[in-house]
Image (cartoon, rainbow, N blue to C red):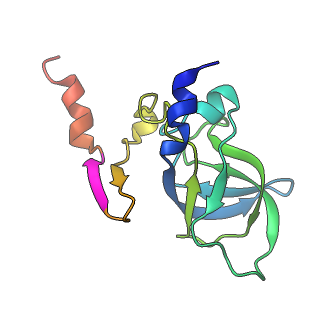
Amino acid sequence: MEPGRSLVANAAALVNRVTGVKTNGNKNFIVIDGSMSELIRPSLYDAYQHIELVAPAGSDAEVKTYDVVGPVCESADFLGKNRELPTPKRGDGIVVHDAGAYCMSMASTYNLKMRPPEYWIEDDGSITKIRHAETFDDHLRYFEGL
């Protein structure tokens, strides 16, 4: 048992936008702007993360089985496989839950994907940014003095 994860996993979520919906003829894919760079646990350990649309399509939306994948050019860039979800539209919000444990601590800048901002949400719904989104200039600072 790993007590840290059990305490904080559900304390955070990775909030994303749908960038595309596609099929290869055999599988359906929801492509999002999040990736294995921000949350590697599904790719690394086949960890299950609950995934849902922020504002699900109407009740008449077709439900299909999707793999939820990121834009990184790796076959392992997935956040969830075989998920029954309503068909989203480009720009829809999609949430990967239980990202509170090891999401940002294991995040990388692989494929020049900068780390996303982090926000704190109070019980009253107020939101405070607690970490800015990394920029390319932030990334270049790692190489200063070389």
Asked if one can make out residue 114 in the rendered structure from this viewpoint, the answer is: yes
Instruction: Please state if 139 lies on the left or on the right of 85 as rendered.
Output: left
Q: Which residues are magenta?
A: 127-133
Tell me the quarter of the image containing the N terminus.
top right
Residue farthest toward the right in the current orientation of the protein: 26
Does residue 125 sit above or below 141 in this rendering? Answer: below
Q: Classify 55 as above or below 41.
A: below
Residue located at (65% from left, 72% from top): 56
| Picture quadrant of residue 81 | top right
Percent x, y of residue 110: 45, 33
- Specify whether residue 63 is painted magenta: no
Residue lying furthest front: 123
Q: Residue at x 72, y 56 (%)?
A: 29
Magenta: predominant secondary structure element?
A: strand
Front-most of 123 and 61? 123
The residue depicted at 64 percent of the width and 32 percent of the height is 43
Is 34 placed left or right of 43 in the picture?
A: left
x%, y% of residue 117? Answer: 34, 49
Of residues 37 and 75, which is closer to you in this image?
A: 37
In the picture, measured across the screen, residue 94 lies left or right of residue 133, that is right
